[in-house]
Image (cartoon, rainbow, N blue to C red):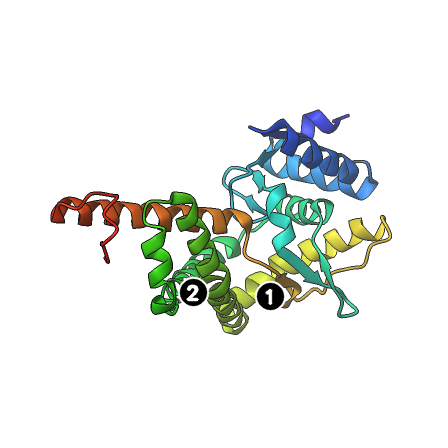
Amino acid sequence: MADFDDLIYVFGDDPALVAPVKKAMEEIYALPEGKAIFEEAHRLHSKFLTVYVDGKQDYPSGYEDKTHAIRVNPLAFKGYAFRTETGEKLPFCMVRALAHESEHAAHPDPLGLTEQYAKRLKTFQHEAARQARDFTYPKSSYTQQFITARSDPERLKQIYQDIFDNHYAPAVFSSFEWLRNQVIQDPTCKRYLDEIESPAIAFENLIMSKQGQPGRILDYAQAAVKKEVSPQLRSNWVADYVAFHIKRRDAFYAANGIKDDDSSIRW
């Protein structure tokens, strides 16, 4: 009779992040319905389910059929909430997300709906990303700040954090809603949501009901609520912009023979 270690392998680079993920998987496995889903996943794929804990990915969790692996980042959950069957908005938790992904691992997809959906979603995501990248901000409001911070990387970081929070993040939320609307209206996406995502939500609701927790609405496209942009995305965005700013500044200095301590510079 298969036990936890025969069916599931949880690993990652950071033991502090791996531990709560493994604990959540063990909670699911401890339930008869949970163990049954892991056994079905093993029967379907003829190998254990891999759970890779990645503290750098900018989304909470996802399942990859080709590798039979769940990828999860415990640090990304606080940016998301879900709508309950009674209309409340509650924070995601690890057990809920992992139960959802575990059902995907045990769900056959002979028609390739997941791959079809992924292609359509990728097209929409590219456009949504373009919309976010095209955000605008009042550059004149930051001109003096950039001048005084030109030799202070930490101050530059603070300026770009402010731009992110007040100008880029709202553009991300807007693009997220645009993406949601495209998915809802697309026939290929709708079939995938009905046949693949709805059963996963039903299973996660079953598992959460054992813990006395409310269920998520079955309409997958409407169920997720983006509360905030992930800390990873914010950190990466700011770091990229600061690095580009410094690179551009250094090139300007070199081209014009300017020393870094020249207080007269207005570039």
Residue 208, given in percent of the width and then of the height, sits at: 79, 51
Q: Is residue 258 left or right of residue 112?
A: left
Amino acid type, label 1: Ala
Q: Is residue 9 above or below residue 266?
A: above
The N terminus sits in image quarter: top right
Tell me residue 200's x, y (percent): 67, 54
Q: Secondary structure at mark 2?
A: helix
Where 174 sits versus 99, above or below? below
For residue 233, side relative to residue 200 (left or right): left
- Counting other residues with Cα less than 10 Å from the Cα at mark 1, is it few (<14), some (14-19), or many (20 or more)? some
Say which residue appears at 63% left-offset and 56% top-offset: 80
The residue that label 2 is drawn on is 128
Q: Marks 1 and 2: CB-CB under 8 Å?
A: no
- Which residue is rendered at x = 61% and y = 57% of the image? 196
Circle 1 residue? 221
235 and 52: which is toward the camera: 235
